[in-house]
Amino acid sequence: MRRLPGITVVTALAVLTSVAPAQAARPGDRPAHPRTPSPLSGTSTPSGTATAGTSARSGRQAAFTRAARTYGVPQSVLLAVSYLESRWEGHDGRPSVSAGYGPMHLVDGRAAPGRPHGTGEDPRGDETRPRLIAVPSVAKDRPRDTLRRAAELTGLPPDRLREDASANIMGGAALLADYRRRAGGSPRDDPAGWYEAVARYPGTRERGAADEDAAFSFADEVYATIRAGAARVTDDGERVVLPATPDLPTPLSPSAPSAPSAPFAPPAPSTPPSVSPASPASSPAFLTAFARPAPAKPSRPSEPRAPLPLERRASPSEPPTEPPAEPPSASPTPTPTPAATPTPIPAKKIAMMPAPGPDCPKSVSCEWLPAAYERLPGGGYGNHDRSDGPREIDYIVIHDGETSYDAMTRLAKDPTYLSWHFTIRSADGHIAQHLRARDIGWHAGNWYVNSRSIGLEHEGYLAKGGAWYTEAMYLASARLVRHLAAKYDIPLDRAHILGHDNVPGTTPETVAGMHEDPGPYWDWAHYFELLGRPLRASGGDAARSVLIRPDYGTNRPGFTGCGGGCRDLGAASVWLRTRPSTTAPLVRDIGKHPTGDSTYSVYDHAARASTGQRYALAERRGDWTAIWYLGQKAWFHDPATAPTSVRASGPLVTPRPGRSPVKVYGRAYPMKPAYPRGVPTQDLTPLQYSIPAGQAYSSGPATRGSYLRAASFDPSKHRVVTGDARYRQIQFGHRIMFVRASDVRPVTG
């Protein structure tokens, strides 16, 4: 499912193009009235092409060909729109969080959004001021009902459009042709003339200036996809190919009935840079080939769009086309500390005064929708903590919201709920920012992580097989994370770009209730390719770590616990067992299951390692690899013919002689002497885990213990406490955790 690079994609797809579908038929091939005859009735189109209905498994590529010919839509346009909306998946007729169905994401405007998170953990993660969240009811949003409009245009019943992928593709083609007519044009071969129809497709264009910007941004992404090409095998075994069109003509604005079309300015070079198929995804040429332009949006459709350079940046703090291997550090900024400190830790860039407007790169569509900050009855306040001083940021936390973008953005405005920094929409990748980076969201269930992180919520479902983690959303999210990582010196690795399911509990009592999103269906390998940091082997045969790296499409671990049953789908996780055998029990997690065994539930991370996580190598035996995990040896299937890990280099730590078993913590708080008068001492409570002698764990950089005391509506009363105690972040289980640096010694990895 990777985008194929630049011009040389033609060579890479030489064999595929022999079976690739023909381009769209001439406008005259479209039926005079789309409802007569029904395009899937088994009759012929005017061109004589049979359009007998087919199931989702009898030719997805052919279904795009038929739909394009039936409605006169350029096939490249139809394929690119579907790729961004669904990655060409049918999802077994299951809806997205915004009630969209099938490869074309036809939206049922009568369906209610899913219910958001809110149980199991205190999002603030600070037991000194517990705040249990009751999920408020969210008024039903009424999106545009494209499902029933497609039914009107095709004559097909809504149920069939939901459940039959071929019918769904036909409905999407009918919508695009309808939007083309409504824009004042007529169906034709030239993809460049379909820009306005494509912009209308996500269904948000008419709702305001921000959503109009999102519509044009989506169209830009569609045309970038057509230029670059794409190919993947869907989860139900369908191979779909969009051949690259690097010389795609400049998109044209819609024609007014009485005036000729005005050309848009080029959103990308007509000939992308040459990139060999073997070029790494982090290379400048690769990233430039995939860079989506950020042209200014026209004030009205018939005006030409002003050109802007690829990946234009507002300031030097925004990311270059390829992020630096090690982000540059800013000048040290002192943090108040009541005691002398040992060797200083290198300073980071820190979030300072907020800038006007949203803090997003220019290559995405983004708006400012502030979260609520209000006093509540009884002396509390919500739904985040403001800051009037600098804030160090170490992490970006990836969430999925389990409900629609509209529901999430309205919940962020509720002072009795919780907060995060950004929400990303699945249909078009539009982003809403709710908090400034310098402010602290209540999102991760761990106050230490909250106080040092930025939280990103995505439309999606943890337990529905990656349903509606769309390409449009992955692209926008990756561009945002690259921007934030460069701005705040956050390394682009899995020790700093965390899932919510990688955030540790704060005390033994909170471990079992921590959230599990975005779950095993989030495609971390693809995400890091889009970040420009593909997950690769390093260190050679001498490396003492492994990086979990299964092939997402073919790695199908199988899960239970999905409503309606879990499909056999690709995933980013591998099972961990007590012995090198598929019949061996899963390893135990005494924090997640104090009195029971780990399970195969999609919601149970207790015996899983995830793509991009690095672990210390414990042993190899045949087709099996063992790692140190939660204080025990854990085995996963890793055959040479279908490896699920790669060698990796990096720092490790092991208990110092005489210090084992080493205590493990869920946060890196200062020791008691560091707290000044007036700031309550935070208990440094170890979790229920420990590290025996002889084991090793992958380690991140050392950090000095710190605690942000923020228990007042007035941010001027907040205090930052830092002390002498130093910690090492480790990959201990599925989640990161912390150990005292004095308890461990480094091991060459």
Image (cartoon, helix red, strand yellow):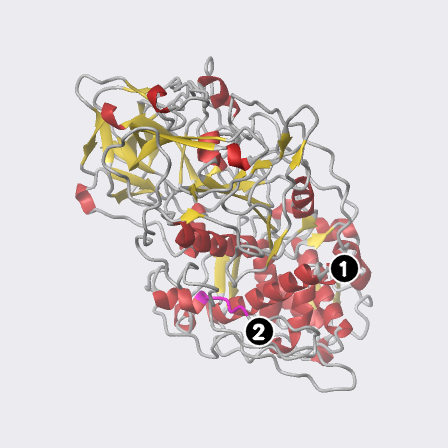
Q: CA distance from mark 2 to mark 1?
A: 24 Å
151 to the left or right of 58: right
x and y percent of residue 431 in the render?
59, 53
| Of marks 2 and 1, the one in the foreground | 1
For the residue marked with disc 2, what is the amino acid? Ala
Say whether residue 490 is magenta.
no
Question: Is the residue 606 above or below the residue 521 in the image?
Answer: above
Q: Quarter of the image containing the C terminus?
A: top left
In this rendered view, identify the residue nearer to me: 303 or 195: 303
Residue located at (45% from left, 63% from top): 315
x and y percent of residue 722 in the render?
36, 31
Say the numbered circle drawn on residue 150: 1
Using a 10 Å C-alpha cutoff, classify the residue at mark 1 as few (fewer than 14 neighbours), some (14 to 19) or many (20 or more): many
In this rendered view, identify the residue nearer to me: 690 or 91: 690
| Magenta stretch secondary structure, dominant | loop
Residue at the top extreme of this rendering: 595
For the residue marked with disc 1, what is the amino acid? Ala
x and y percent of residue 634 in the render?
33, 27
703 to the left or right of 244: left
Q: Earlier in the sequence, mark 2 or mark 1?
A: 2
Residue located at (41% from left, 68% from top): 288
Q: Secondary structure at mark 2?
A: loop
| Range shown magenta | 290-294
In this rendered view, identify the residue nearer to me: 69 or 661: 661
Question: Is the residue 125 above or below the residue 409 in the image?
Answer: above
Q: Are marks 2 and 1 in contact (CB under 8 Å)?
A: no
244 to the left or right of 661: right
Residue 653 visible to an observer of this rendering:
yes
Q: Which residue is mark 2?
A: 22
Using a 10 Å C-alpha cutoff, classify the residue at mark 2 as few (fewer than 14 neighbours), some (14 to 19) or many (20 or more): some
x and y percent of residue 412 in the render?
64, 41
Residue 568 visible to an observer of this rendering:
no
